[in-house]
Image: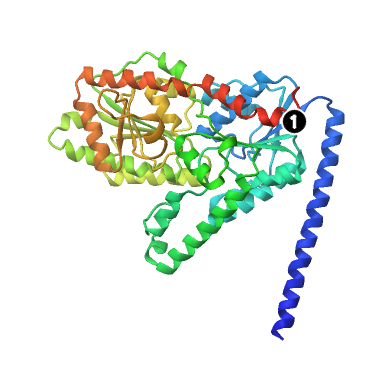
Amino acid sequence: MFLKILYILNGLVALFVIVLGLALYCLRKYLQSRKSKLADRNVNVVNVGIFHPYCNAGGGGERVLWCAVRSLQAKYDNIKILIYTGDIESSPNAILEKAKSVFNIYIEKDSVTFVYLKLRHWVEAKKYPCFTLLGQSIGSILLGLEALCKFPPDIYIDTMGYAFTLPLFRYIGCCKVGCYVHYPTISTEMLRRVQQREYSHNNHSYVVRNPFLTWTKVTYYKLFAKMYSWVGRSSETIMVNSSWTENHILNLWGAPFKTHRVYPPCEVNHIKKLKRSENPNKIIILSVGQFRPEKDHPLQLQTMYELRTLLNRNEEMWNKIQLVILGSCRNESDYERLKNMQDLSKHLSLENSVEFKVNVPYSELLEIYKIASIGIHTMWNEHFGIGIVECMAAGLIMVAHKSGGPLLDIIETSEGSQNGFLATDASEYANCILSIIYNSLEQNEVIRNAARSSVERFSEKEFEANFLRAIIPLFNKYIK
């Protein structure tokens, strides 16, 4: 009886594999036919598809997207750029206008087409309370299938980290495939935190307390890392945004000869020209970043609480200090997170010392850069940190987390070449800020000048040159 059941199961698995293989073969033939018809309709036009389901979010990843689009438009005359997006409620004009308003990036409308995707909810984390990484990855395949069926491109570039779409577009869609990786979906640090049973936003307390659940999650992470490694290798050119990301991608994907470090674009030249107008009676500490859980905004409020404790006998100085937390909200979860932050500031009696600014236009951000004197960034293992670089270009003295991109690429703390500060917890952050406040004007000016001098390598011009160099293998077939 057992053998009969086993034979039946084997037969069903074999049947499923055959049916799936036939379905994929038919889909491949259908897509080839569609691409041929599109090519006949637009002779000599190369369709470049860029997969960015949240293109209207207004974060650092979107700055990379729009700078990439602008550089492609400037370099190639015979291309049509397809933006695969799930922002179905936003018109093309509204999306491009936001890119101009938030990032000061102008995109020519004529060569850009938006392909709207209705299945974006399948990649949202809230849909998968368990096995979130796997759920989102499978969801990205469904979303990629929708994109592929709606408009199969000649060249496909993922700019948002959905690595599981890469083999889909390469082997089923017959596209040349590349990707820009902001951070690996899984990393050795994530695995280490679970193994050592450390609490974090993606390792809940009930898992930390339970040895069996910890073992299950470690096994799941290891299996997922194997799959992630396989799909990543299908990319023909791999761009990474920092040394930290590069180290992890090389370790996971093992493709050093097609991996390129392309620092994200930061508008440093324009910002460096801003005329500072600090108020001597006000010390503004500025935080710039989306309201996402990994940005760890609560640590900034804890830092302010610690700072007030350090200044408990200097009420006059404390009254001068104000934390401005500026960022964008993508969805209801972000707005709920913002509300929780506002409640926490009241709980810590900081409501008079903290101001929240949400989805502000670029022009307002520039005005805040002029009057702020200190910058704060609290994300652990931030993959790069565009906001950090732009604050430094504006003349703010940065205090960032001692990990990831800020540690490896951006901030130098050695005597004689210091351009900022690094910290790990609220106490260290508060002490760094206190040092800046009590430093002499000359000491702070030396740090500011060093910071401004160091950010030139992260300019938009450098990004565009390195981006275009990295994607040459994708265009060789089409550009003679």
Question: On the image, which quarter does residue 469 sit in?
Answer: top right
Q: Residue furthest front?
A: 257
* Residue at the disc numbered 1: 47
- Depicted 256 relative to depicted 70: above or below: below
Given the image, on which type of amino acid does mark 1 rest? Asn
Q: Is residue 129 something that shows in the picture?
A: no
Q: Residue furthest left?
A: 313
Dot 1 falls on a residue whose secondary structure is strand
Q: Is residue 40 something that shows in the picture?
A: yes
Q: Residue at x 43, y 46 (%)?
A: 293
On-image quarter of the C terminus: top right
Measured as percent of width and height from the top left, residue 303 is found at 28, 40
Q: Residue at x 64, y 29 (%)?
A: 471
Measured as percent of width and height from the top left, residue 8 is found at 75, 76
Q: Residue at x 37, y 24 (%)?
A: 392
Measured as percent of width and height from the top left, residue 79 is found at 73, 25
Q: Which residue is more in the foreground, 124 or 227? A: 227
Circle 1 packing at 10 Å, graded few (<14), some (14-19), many (20+), is: many
Question: On the image, which quarter does residue 356 sit in?
Answer: top left
Q: Which residue is more in the foreground, 39 or 359? A: 39
Colour mode of the rendering: rainbow
Measured as percent of width and height from the top left, residue 103 is found at 52, 24
Answer left or right for 96 relative to 246: right
- Depicted 21 relative to depicted 257: above or below: below
Question: On the image, which quarter does residue 206 sit in?
Answer: bottom left
